[in-house]
Amino acid sequence: MSVLITGGLGHVGSWVAYQLAKQGKQVIICDMAAGRFENLGLDYLETVRDKLILESIDVLDYHSLFEVMLRHRGDLEGVVHGVSVIAGPNFQTRPYKHTTINTNGTLNVLETCRILGIKKVVNMSSGAVYGDASGPQSEATPYKATDLYGATKIAGELFGLQYTDTFGMDVRNARLFFVYGPGKRPSDMHQVYQAMFGPLEGLDNILAPNGSEQALDWTHVHDTATGIVQLFEKESVTHRNFNISSGVTVAHTDIIRHVADLIGKTSNVQLGPGVFVGRGAPLDISLAEREIGFAPKFTDIREGLHDYWQWLKGIQGRA
Ligand SMILES: NC(=O)c1ccc[n+]([C@@H]2O[C@H](COP(=O)([O-])OP(=O)(O)OC[C@H]3O[C@@H](n4cnc5c(N)ncnc54)[C@H](O)[C@@H]3O)[C@@H](O)[C@H]2O)c1
């Protein structure tokens, strides 16, 4: 059997692809970055390369997306949809374009699945659908958008729920939260991420504009991907929305301290006043624990940071 992953070369999608390929599944990755695969530094995907089919596709190019999914549908178990422009300062720089990718991109994937009779879709959503509601936020916490990104994730979820109710599809929303870890270099991320995780890569002198007064349940990407794979593989579910995070809140200032302890050096990194994004924490992950057997491994962020550091050192060593 095969699984198609949109955004399968992204931080989360690439680990979902890796885990499924490791199980022996064929994984079809539809990602705009497919033509640059060799330069992305996703060393773990190179180890399962024979299980991957790479398709360079823009999800906004509906006809090409449709053709690719038509070509692969025979053996398809389902789709994991992971294309989005993620939250952060970049989102506001091109609001119309980024909103279109997140909303119309999701709609294009769902519509193609509907026409081709592909029922099962796991949609990578976000704890952003709760906005700044105070934690713990359960799946029963009402929708609240505190930024445009959050609005797009709510829209994507609602599309999925309506495609399920109206057309008998089986769309499951995985509400992810602040992901860190192997596969993403801090130097490719925004300043708040760089201030916290950058010293693991040797970055120094990072002055981020905000984020010092925030605590979030940062989640190691292996745990995020495991939760998505478990949700995808569960034969049937009694709920549609599942929180997938570490479930443990950590202050941003503590992350900076843990990183300094780990590398044995205090770097010149600072977070400015206030919060990075309007979010509460943590997500209540008890539903995912009960229903799909989700059990995050890196609940002590120090272990997750250590694993991340090892990966960053490994890719620097090979460069
Ligand atoms: N990273 C987080 O902290 C986080 C938190 C909550 C939710 N999420 C959600 O998880 C999902 C994955 O996030 P991520 O961190 O892996 O993102 P990412 O930016 O690392 O990956 C996105 C991938 O999508 C591809 N892409 C972008 N636009 C495309 C398009 N138009 N057509 C085809 N491919 C396109 C990119 O090339 C990239 O490989 C997203 O839906 C995001 O909203 C992420």
Image (cartoon, helix red, strand yellow):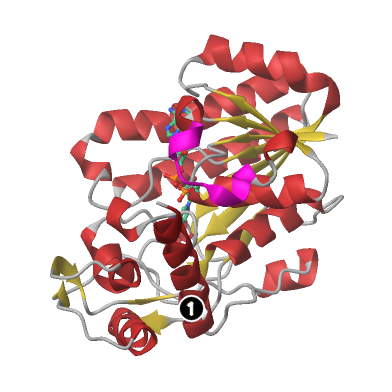
Where, by quadrant of the figure, is residue 289 drawn? bottom right
Q: Position of residue 18 (x, y in %)?
A: 67, 49
Range drawn in magenta: 37-46
Where, by quadrant of the figure, is residue 221 drawn? bottom right
- Identified at 62% across, 57% down, the residue is 225
Question: Between residues 226 and 171, which one lies in front from this camera angle?
Answer: 226
- Identified at 45% across, 81% down, the residue is 249
Count numbered badges in the picture: 1
Disc 1 packing (10 Å; few <14; some 14–19; many ≥20): some
Above or below, comparing residue 95 to residue 11 in the picture: above
Question: Between residues 197 and 161, which one lies in front from this camera angle?
Answer: 197
Residue 169 in sight from this viewpoint: no
- Residue 39 highlighted magenta (yes or no): yes
The response on whether ligand 1 sits within 8 Å of label 1 is no
Where, by quadrant of the figure, is residue 17 drawn? top right
- Residue 216 highlighted magenta (yes or no): no
Q: Main secondary structure of the magenta part?
A: helix
Q: Position of residue 12 (x, y in %)?
A: 54, 51
Q: Position of residue 128 (x, y in %)?
A: 42, 57
Residue occupying the far front of the picture = 318
Above or below, comparing residue 161 to residue 266 in the picture: above
Residue 307 in sight from this viewpoint: yes
- Identified at 41% across, 82% down, the residue is 250
Q: Which residue is mark 1?
A: 306
Quadrant location, the N terminus: top right
- Identified at 74% across, 27% down, the residue is 167
- Name the kind of residue labelled 1 in the image: His
Question: Between residues 61 and 241, which one lies in front from this camera angle?
Answer: 61
- Could you tell me which secondary element the residue under label 1 belongs to? helix
